[in-house]
Each structure stands twice: as structure tokens, then as C-alpha cells.
Amino acid sequence: MGYFIARVDDNQAEIVETFRKAGFSVFDTSGIGRGFPDLILGRNSYTWLVEIKMPEGKLNKKQIKFHQEWKGCAIAIIRSVEEAVEFSRNVP
């Protein structure tokens, strides 16, 4: 079995900080791999899964498969601090 080092997008730290400032609990799951999203967010008894991508980044095959097969909440794809702010304003 091969091992890999999970790649974290360069914009993830500032997006995480933006979510925390907006009152979310943030759990970094970027090290899980196998297509699982990068973050779990919680606020006001709601939970969201979030995939962080660079502005031009695309989902890889494992991420696409996970997104297609996931039967829980929708998975948000956030590419910038501005998108994180917008997301924060539009959810409970």
C-alpha cells in the first residue's frame, strides 16, 4: 500500500480563519484522503462538508466519486475568502 502526504491548498489557512471568525467550529479533515472533503463546519446545530480548492483547481477522481456517492448534506466547494464569506452569510 502506498502512502502519500495530503496536499493542502495554499488558500486553506485563510479560509479556515474566515470561517472561524464567522462563528463556525472548524475541523480540518484534509489528511483523511480517499476523496473526503477538507473541512467539517458546524454552526447553529448545522453541519457542512467543505472542499477547499484554489481558484482554478478541479476535483480529482476520488473527490468526484465521493461527491457523487455522498448521501448526506451537500458538499460546498470554496475557492476564496470571498466565497467563504458569501457561504457564511447564506447559511444558518
Image: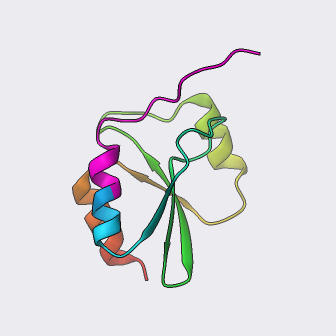
Q: Nearer the viewer, residue 28 or 81?
A: 28
**Residue 12, magenta (yes or no):** yes
Question: For the image shown, how many numbered marks are present on the structure?
Answer: 0
Q: Residue furthest right?
A: 1
Say how the picture is coloured: rainbow
Residue shown at 56% from the left, 71% from the top: 47
Residue 40 position, x and y percent, is: 53, 60
Residue 7 at x, y percent in the picture: 46, 29
Residue 21 x %, y %? 28, 70
Q: Is residue 19 left or right of residue 35?
A: left
Q: Position of residue 32 (x, y in %)?
A: 62, 40
Asked whether residue 18 is drawn in magenta, I would say no
- Which quadrant would the C terminus be assigned to in this image? bottom left
Q: Residue furthest left?
A: 82
**Picture quarter containing residue 72?**
bottom right
Q: Residue at x 62, y 36 (%)?
A: 33
Does 24 sit left or right of 6 as displayed? left
Q: Which residues are magenta?
A: 1-16
Instruction: Tell me which corner region of the image, top left, top right, bottom left or bottom right, holds residue 5.
Output: top right
Residue sitting farthest toward the top: 2
Q: Is residue 29 above or below residue 48?
A: above
**Residue 60, located in which quarter of the rendered image?**
top right
Q: Is residue 35 above or below residue 5?
A: below
> At 28% from the left edge and 62% from the top edge, which residue is drawn?
18
Q: Residue at x 35, y 55 (%)?
A: 16
On-image quarter of the N terminus:
top right
Type of secondary structure dominating the magenta stretch: loop
